[in-house]
Image (cartoon, helix red, strand yellow):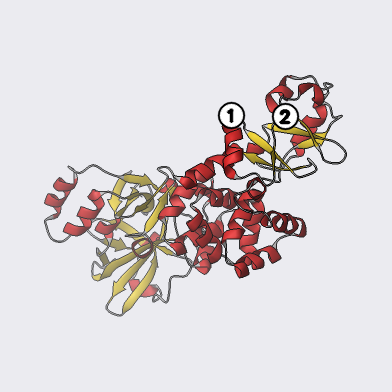
Amino acid sequence: MSALALTELLGLPVFEPSGGQVGRVRELAVAPQEDRARIAIVIVRTKNGDRVMPFSAVNSINGGFRIDSELSAWPIADGSEGLFLLARDLLDQQIIDVHGRKVVRVNDVDLHQDPGTQHPTLRVGSVDVGARGAIRRLLKGVVPIAALHALLNQIPERLIPWDFVDLIEIDPARRVKLKISHERLARLHPADIADIVEELAPNEREAVFETLDEEVAAETLEEVHPKVQKAIVESLDSDRAAEIVEEMDPDAAADLLADLPEETSADILQEMGPQERKEMVELLEHKENTAAGRMNTDYLAVGVSALSKDAVEALRHFEGGVETVSTIYLVDSRGTLAGAVPLAKLVLASPETPLLSLTQEPLISCHEDADEKKFAELFDKYNLLTLPVIDDQSKLTGVITSDDVISILRAKL
C-alpha cells in the first residue's frame, strides 16, 4: 500500500474521460457517519464554481485525477455539512495525540492508496506533525519535485496513526453531524487527560468536556489546576456542570463550588439532585482550610457488631472513590466512631470474624475544626491513608484521604 501526502494531491489537475482538464483538486473529504478514514468526496475547483464528486468516480491518480464521467454530472458545492474536509479541518489544526498524551499541530496528512481494486481508494493513514510535513508545504512549487523528495527523505518522520487521533471541534452542531466524540481520550488516565486539557484553548476545553461522560469528566476536573477547573465549569451550562460536579468527590466538589461566583454556584446547586445538593450545602458551611472543609463524605462505615462478610457486602455496593476504601470504620447506633479496620486485615479474615477484633490501634481521628497543619501532621506521624473526621459528639462525619493532603501540599509549592 503506497502513501500519498495530502498537500501533494491538493491542486492536482482533474481530467475527464476525453482527456481534457476540467479543474483542480480543492479538497478531499471523509464522511464520518460512514467511515472515519476513507476518502469519500473530492471537491473540484472549476471556472464555474466548485463541484462535489464522489471519490468512486476517480479511475486513477497519476499526475492528476482521472475520472470516469463528465464533471458537470456532479453538483455544485453548496456547503459541506456532514463532511470533514482534510485541508480546512485538519491542516494547521490542533489535535489530541492519545498515544503520546499530548496536543500537537498537523502539518500534513498521509493517505494510503490501495491499488488492488478497480477504482483506487484512499484512506487517512496518519497525520504528520513534524518538520517533514512543514517543509513539504513550504517548498511545494518552489523547488523541483525530485529535489524536494530527496530533501524530505533525509528528514525523520513524525507521524501519528489516525487511530490515535482525537479531533477537537468547538461547534456543538458540527460535533453531532461529524460524530466527533472523545472515546479514545476518555480511555486515558484522568491525570493525563487533565494535562492535555490544560494545553487547549478555553473553547477547546469546553468542547472536550461536552463529549466526555460525566464520570470521566469529573475525575479529570479534579486533576486540573484550580484556575482552569473554575474556567471550565463557568463555560458549561449549569445542568451539564451539575452532572459533572455530582460525580466528583464531595470534598473536591465543595472546594470548586466555593471558588465559583455565588450566582454560578447557586445555579449549579439548583440543578443537582436533592441529596447531593444537601450534602454540598453542608460541606460549604465549613471553612475550606479545616478538616471539615477538606473531608470526603463518601466513606465505608458499618455497625460495631458487623462481621467480616458484612464489610465485604458493603464494599460490593460502595460507589465512592477507591481512595476511601483502604479503611472501613465502625460506628455505634448513634454514629459515634468506634474503630477502624484496614482493608488488608479484612482480606485475610474469615467471613465470620467480628470486625471489632480486627481494629487498628490506636484509633486516630481529628475534629472537624482541625486546621490543615494539624491533620497533615497526623498523616505524617502515623503514615495514614485515611483519617476519620469527628464532631463534638465524636460522630463520624467524613474522612480525609492522603490524596487530599498531597493536593494541599502541592498548592503550597
Instruction: Choose between 98 and 82: the one closer to the eye.
Output: 98
Percent coordinates x, y for residue 201 in the rendering = 42, 61
Asked where in the image residue 394 lies, by quadrant, the reply is top right
Point 50% across, 48% down: residue? 185
Figure check: 218 above or below 271: above
Residue 363's tag is 2
Q: What is the three-letter code of the residue carrying label 1?
A: Lys
Figure check: 81 above or below 257: below
Look at mark 1 in the image and give the residue it sits on.
Answer: 381
Figure check: 314 above or below 17: above
Percent coordinates x, y for residue 278 in the rendering = 75, 57
Instruction: Choose between 125 and 388: the one closer to the eye.
Output: 388
Tally of numbered discs: 2
Instruction: Choose between 378 and 224: the one closer to the eye.
Output: 378
Percent coordinates x, y for residue 74 in the rendering = 39, 72
Under circle 2, the secondary element is: loop
